[in-house]
Structure formats: structure tokens, C-alpha cells
Amino acid sequence: MTVRMIIDTDTASDDAVALAMALRHPGVRVLAITTVAGNCSVEQATRNALFTTELCESDVPVHQGAAGPLLVPASFATWFHGQDGLGDQGYPPPLRRREATDAITALVATIRANPGCTVVTLGPLTNVVMALRQAPDLVDCVERCVVMGGTVNAVGNVTPAAEFNLWFDPHAARAVFSSGLPIELAPWEICRGDAGLNRAEQEALRGLNTPLGHFFVDCNSTAMEAARRQSGTERMELPDPAAMAIALDKEAVVTRSTRHYVEIEAGSPLTRGMSVVDSLNVTGNPPNVEVIRAMDVDRFKQMIFEAAGG
Ligand code: RIB
Ligand code: CA
């Protein structure tokens, strides 16, 4: 059965690969793409999303959303993804235009009109919480909400305690995790280590000699260099594609997941955005999140190559 999917994204390097994976998957109908500030401004994220849909020869509607977090100031990650979010490769502006309808309105209308849909979030959760505030009934319309974000009591990538998506708008993340949405959490650590594309795999991707194969490597070049400086890795770590692979083919990709109570810190400057996972169930609180603990790395990478046209 065709999966009806809505993707919320702060479209930068890894988001673009994840978008392509969904747009080129034969079993998925992407109903809408909604953009949110995070990696870059929401205007830039919208341009990048439109550009990526053009590369995928898709006319899926793109709706622009929140320009910043609910309460804290916006702190874009251009230091990681480049000024334009796509590795500053000088890509031309998109020919397509975004929809007049804003992202929040589009999320509410599209989810309500498609009960049983899958929502995939690849950026901060500002749009999602604003849609839930407008329409709490959305919780009952969403079959799966795959969230790229957080860590499981592990090192953060923007502070020692937090991963970027949840840190950027911690109040939105806190509200979404307590909303009752059926969250499947793809934490940052599952895209690291062997899950990252090594040099040979990057060359093989380029070796497909397809527009998307080159695009995947080129638009992630700045992020790769930033990751190397940050943690010493030589691999191309792709968190959003990891979340998308889970959304697209959970049976084949997920090798271990556990359910836990998860709460997001929004008050403490030190641990702002931390995903506090009750791994030992010591709080007695009912689990609200399925935490993806491990995935089949070979199947994950195969999906990236398939999307690139391999
Ligand atoms: O921490 C990684 C996440 O933050 C990814 O979604 C990346 O695109 C950035 O949004
Ligand atoms: Ca992202």
C-alpha cells in the first residue's frame, strides 16, 4: 500500500538527501513538504527544498513555515552546512515557487485529510507544535511520526547534552514529545560510526555519475568538513536520511528499538534540548516514544544509492 507522507524540514545538506529518498521511492506519495527555520533561515530552507524537488522532477507542494523558535532566539547552523545550507556550491535558484498557504495551515489540512499518514520531521519541531496547538486532533490522524532528533543519553552535537533539532527549539520539542503523537525517534548516534559513508562509498556514489549521486556528495561537502573538525570523522554522517530510511522501510532497516518515557529539557541553559530517555524505566511514567537503537547499515546505504539512481 502506498504510504502517504508529509515531510517537515529545515532543508540543508542531509535533509536534501532524505527528501530525494522519499520523492524517488516507488511506495511513497509525498503529500506536502513544509519548511522550518533551523539549519538555515526558513526562506533558504524553502529555496533548498524547492531546488531538491526540481532535481527529483517532483511537483510536490512546498509550504513555508516558522521563521524561528517559539521562545528562544534563532541560532542557524550555517557554520555546519554552509551559508546556503547546501554546501555553498552555487546552485541556481529554483524555478518552482512555494505555495501561498503557510506550513501550519498545510500541515493541519493535509494531515486531517489523510488519516493514517506518516509524518517525518527532519528539523526543529516549531511547525509541528504550532499545528498541534491549532488542531490537537491531528494526534489521532497520524499513524507514524518519525522524528530525527535527540540522543539516547549520549553526546550532543550542538552542546554536550543536546542534538541540534531539539536544541534549536526546546519548547517546541518538549511540547511535541508530550503531545501523544506516535513518535519513533531516530537519534543522532544511529547515523554515526559505520553508518556514515566512508571515502570509498562516497566515491561509489559519485561513480554512479547521476545528477543526484553528484548532488548528494557535493551538497554535503561542507557538512563533512565541519563534522571532521568537530569529531574527527572522515565519514559522511547523514542523520536525516537515517530517519527517512526508518520511515520508508522500518522492517528492513530497524534491527533494535525500545519504548521509553522521553522528556525534553527546555529550562536549563546547560541541558537545553536534551532528550532525557528513561532507559531503565525508573520514573514509572508510561513510555511515549519508540527509540530506534540500531539499524541495518547496509540496507540504509543501499537506500541512499537507490535514491541516487544506482
Ligand atoms: O543534528 C542533526 C540534525 O540537525 C539534522 O536534521 C540536520 O539537518 C540538522 O537539522
Ligand atoms: Ca535537518
Image (cartoon, helix red, strand yellow):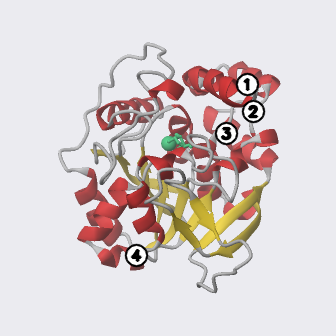
Give the amino acid type for the residue marked by disc 4 in the picture. Answer: Val
Where is mark 1, residue-wise?
202
Give the amino acid type for the residue marked by disc 1 in the picture. Answer: Gln
Q: Residues within 10 Å of mark 3 (few under 14, many from 20)?
A: many
Task: Estimate the x, y position of residue 59 in percent, counting from the top left.
Answer: 35, 41
Q: Nearer the viewer, mark 4 or mark 3?
A: 4
Nearer to the camera, 267 or 81? 267
Marks 1/2 in contact by CB < 8 Å: the verdict is yes
Where is mark 2, residue-wise?
197
Where is mark 4, residue-wise?
139
Closer to the chain start, of discs 4 and 3, is 4
Closer to the chain start, of discs 4 and 1, is 4
User: Could you say which disc has been placed on residue 20 in the image?
Assistant: none
289 horizontally vs 108: left or right: right
User: What element does badge 1 sit on?
Assistant: helix
Marks 2/3 in contact by CB < 8 Å: the verdict is yes
Closer to the chain start, of discs 2 and 3, is 2
Q: Is residue 65 above or below residue 152?
A: above
Label 2 and label 3: CA atoms lie apart by 10 Å
Nearer to the camera, 270 or 203? 270
Q: Residue shown at 81%/45% (left/top)?
A: 298
Q: Residues within 10 Å of mark 4 (few under 14, many from 20)?
A: some
Give the amino acid type for the residue marked by disc 3 in the picture. Answer: Ile
